[in-house]
Amino acid sequence: MDIYVAILSFFCFTKPAFGFGSDQDYQIDIINELDSANATYGITQVAGLHNASKAFIFRDVGRAVQAPPHITERVVQLFRSKSEFTFLASIQQKSSTSGVIFSIHESEHSYFELESSGVREEIRYHYRFKGKPRSESFPYRLADGQWHKIALTISASHLLLHVDCNRIYERVIDPPQMELTLGSGVWLGQHSHKHGLFKGVIQDVKLIFAPNGYITQCPNLNRTCPTCSDFLNLVQGIMDLQDVLAKMTLKLNYAESRLTQLEGCHCERTCSANGLVYRDKELWVEPENCRNCACKNGVVECRRIFCPPANCSEDMLPVHVEGTCCKICRPKCSYMGQTFSEGQRFLSRSCRECKNGLMMKVTETCPELNCTITEQILPEGRCCNVCRGYDFCAEGLICGENSECKNRNTKAECECKSGYASIHGDSTYCEGGSG
């Protein structure tokens, strides 16, 4: 019983948290501000965790829940003037989904972004340090269809994460960049118009620029000593843990005996991909997806082949060359006041194609079409007409695993799937933060 007395003494002599202020000038109720400014397009008010404040449901449909300029300006000013803050929210996330709860970013530069991945069952915090992106991941399942209170506190390089009033993580990180730009966008329930869409209900979203802001969400965390009930619950919790430890010890002993038996045999786990079987540690390339893959203990692990920016000179343009994953620089052509990239064609009196910086005359026999002249169109970069509604994607345009082919009026283009963004402005290969 001495251990229980020692634990109680520790709680009773622990100093309370000082410095917490309730000044409303240093708090922003995000949902209340958005609602007052009529900036809740695409979301619907529903019953929340309680009735003291409004709650909104975020579905996977077109929406744009972005703070107007006057709210964004206030957020930026508070970030610039303070070195610590707390983000609070109550959420009920749809099971096994991924999405951004709150985001402050400009272009692709995230100053503050809190994301919950139901696929990997983790919480992610994205920020910037000295102009470079940083991320912290916390294994925890929020996307379970239940209500959770989440509080992320940043004080210089000190990070605290509370879920349901329990401190689950405490870390030392690189100090986040607090000098936000006025061009930043403040988004709720999404990264941008089409990416990182959160699915579920959100309530009580606040930014508090004061020490120990999590106490606003969980006032009981500000107590100096536990009650008798708290102490009895703590004692029962320790007894339950001892019981769990005893059971785990038995299971561990059994697992060790099984492992000893298995050490005498040689087992190799293979991988199956694209209809082929690969041995453990075997490497291969997927040219259609521009990925390097490996078989690791029965699991296929692939990484995208990184394509740096082409950085072409003024007399060249980046183009895709068959058999390569990354664009390469090729001489551009100038003809009749227009600029063409390698392989593009132009029809004037004759058909010409851009080759090695010159518009070369080419002979091409055009097929007969089963449509009238008025129903015919000239595709971009070609010399022969096709019928309106032609399926350009059927020609086999190669798009990455996170993009898909889309037919346009005069050509086919790759378009990033929902939740993904193009790499270097090229939608052939896309990547995303959710999932």
Image (cartoon, rainbow, N blue to C red):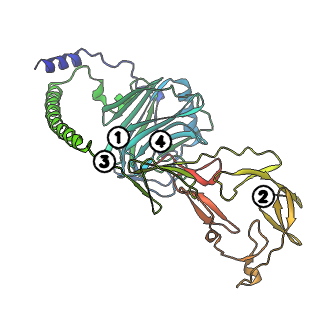
Name the amino acid, label 2.
Glu
Q: How many angstroms separate mark 3 from mark 1 (CA)?
A: 13 Å
Q: How many angstroms separate mark 1 from mark 4 (CA)?
A: 17 Å
Q: Position of residue 160 (x, y in %)?
A: 39, 28
Q: Which residue is mark 3?
A: 146
Mark 1 lies on a secondary structure that is loop
Going from N to C along the chain, the mark reached first, 1 or 4, is 4
Going from N to C along the chain, the mark reached first, 4 or 2, is 4
Q: Is residue 383 above or below residue 262?
A: below
Q: Is residue 148 above or below residue 97?
A: above
Q: Position of residue 353 (x, y in %)?
A: 82, 64
Name the amino acid, label 1.
Tyr
Q: Nearer the viewer, residue 301 or 352?
A: 301
Q: Of the numbered discs in the image, which one, if any, rests on residue 155? A: none
Mark 4 surroundings: few (<14), some (14-19) or many (≥20) residues within 10 A: many
Residue at the farthest left position: 1
Name the amino acid, label 4.
Phe
Q: Of the numbered discs in the image, which one, if any, rests on residue 140? A: 1
Q: Which residue is mark 4?
A: 102
Mark 1 surroundings: few (<14), some (14-19) or many (≥20) residues within 10 A: some
Mark 3 lies on a secondary structure that is loop
Mark 4 lies on a secondary structure that is strand
Q: Quadrant of residue 44?
A: bottom left
Q: Which residue is mark 2?
A: 342
Going from N to C along the chain, the mark reached first, 2 or 3, is 3
* Residue 51 seen in this snapshot: no
Mark 2 lies on a secondary structure that is loop
